[in-house]
Amino acid sequence: MTGMTVRLRLRRSGLALALVWAVAVPASQQPQTPLSQSPGPIRIVEVARDHLTWRRYEPTDASASIDLSDLEVKADIIGKGDPLGYYFSKPEDIKPFLVENGFATLRDPSAASADLKAAAERRAKATYSLIDSAWQSTKRFFQSVWSVILLLGALGIIGAGIQVAYHVWKDRKRERHVDLLVVGESYVGKTFLVERLRDPRASMDELTKRVGETKGEAKSKLPKPIVHGRYELYVTLYDIGGVFYGALWDHLAFYPPDILILTLAPFAISPPDSGIDKDYVERQLAFTEMMVGGYLRSRLPKPKVVLLFVNKADSFPDSKKETLRSAFKPHVAGLEAKGGVRIVFLVGSAHKGWECREVLDVITDELFAT
Ligand SMILES: Nc1nc2c(ncn2[C@@H]2O[C@H](COP(=O)(O)OP(=O)(O)OP(=O)(O)O)[C@@H](O)[C@H]2O)c(=O)[nH]1
Ligand SMILES: [Mg+2]
C-alpha cells in the first residue's frame, strides 16, 4: 500500500468521523460562531510560482454615502440593498463602476469628472462592440447559408414557372365536369335514356341486353368528353332506381347535380289502347310534385336546369304527339312555379334516340354558353 492511499483513507475516515459527530451531537451543544464574528471573504492578492498570498477582508462598521445627483440611476436597482454583489477597494471606484456597467448614466456629460467620462466612453465602446459582434455573426451566418438561399430561390422560381405553365395549359383546355342526375318513376326508361346518351348508335338489342331494373344508384360516364366551343365537358351520369326514394334524397343532399333530368313516360311496359296510362301519369305527377318540387323548395343547393324528358314517344303516331305533350303539362306547370331554376321540356324516345342529342345540347347551352 503506498503513502498516498494511506493519506486518502485517513482523510476519508476523518470526514466520516466529522459527519458522525455532526449527526450524533445535538446542534445546541455544537460550538456556534456568532454572525458578527464570521470571517470576512478571502481574496487572492498575488500568485507566485510556488506559493500564493491571500488576504481576508474583514467587514468594518464604517459607512458613508456618495452623492449621485450627477447620475441618472436605473430604476431597477433603486431600493434593492446591494444589487451589484461586488467588492470595491475604494469608494471612488463605485460611481465609475455604475456608469461603465450600465447601472447609471451621466446627467450632464460635459460637466462630468474625467473618470466618469472615461467610464461612459468605455460603456459606449462595449455597447458598440456588442452590436458590431452581433452584426458580424449575422453576416457570417448569411455568408455560410447564401448558397442554400440561392438554391431555394431558384427552386421557388422554377416551381412558380411550372404553376403558371400549368394554369395556362388548363385554361386553354377549359376542362369542365358536369354531374347529371336522372330520376323518375320505375319503368319510365331512365336507364335506357342513360345508355342511349352514352352510346347514340347502339342497336335496340344491345341496349336491351345492357339494361335491367336499377337497384339503388348507378353511376356512369359519357365515354368521350363533349367538345363545345373552347370547353371539354366530362359528364357523369347518376341513375337512381324509381323506387329508391331514400337514395334519391341522399344524393340530392350530398351531391347536388348540375342538371336534373326528370324522366316521364305515358305508360310503363305496354301502351293501353288510348296510348296513355292515366294512373301511371297521375303517379308521376305525385312524384314530380313531391320529390322534384319538394327538392326545389328545399334549402339544398339547386341544379341549374331541370329537364323534363317525356320518353317513349315512339309509341305515338305524329298525329297524337300533341296529346302526349298535353298529358304532361301539369308536371311542367308544377315545377315552373318554383322559380329560380330553368325548366326545359322535351318529348322524345330513348329507344329511337329522339331528342337525345338535344339533352346534351341543353347541358352545353345552359351551362357553358360561349
Ligand atoms: N317504347 C319505348 N319503350 C322504352 C323506351 N325507353 C325505355 N323503354 C322501356 O321501358 C322499360 C323500362 O326501362 P328502364 O330503362 O329499365 O326503366 P327505368 O326507369 O330505368 O326503371 P327502374 O330502373 O326500375 O327505375 C323497358 O322495358 C324499356 O324497354 C322508349 O324510348 N320507348
Ligand atoms: Mg333503371
Image: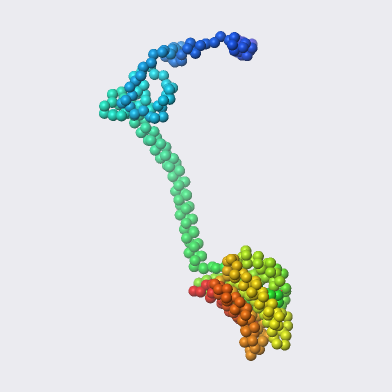
Q: Residue furthest left?
A: 110
Query: Against 191, is 107 above or below?
Result: above
Query: Against 324, is 21 above or below?
Result: above
Relative image position of residue 244 (x, y in whole percent): 70, 69
Q: Residue at x 37, y 32 (%)?
A: 127
Relative image position of residue 85 (x, y in whole percent): 44, 22
Residue 350 visible? The answer is no
Q: Quadrant of the N terminus?
A: top right
Q: Residue at x 72, y 73 (%)?
A: 213
Q: Residue at x 62, y 72 (%)?
A: 293
Q: Quadrant of residue 291?
A: bottom right
Residue situated in front as seen by the camera: 241 or 119 = 241
Residue 61 visible? The answer is yes
Is 338 situated left or right of 67 in this image? right
Residue situated in front as seen by the camera: 149 or 220 = 220
Q: Quadrant of residue 241?
A: bottom right
Residue situated in front as seen by the camera: 251 or 359 = 251
Query: Against 78, is 290 above or below?
Result: below
Q: Residue furthest bottom?
A: 319
Relative image position of residue 140 (x, y in whole percent): 42, 39
Q: Residue at x 45, y 47 (%)?
A: 149
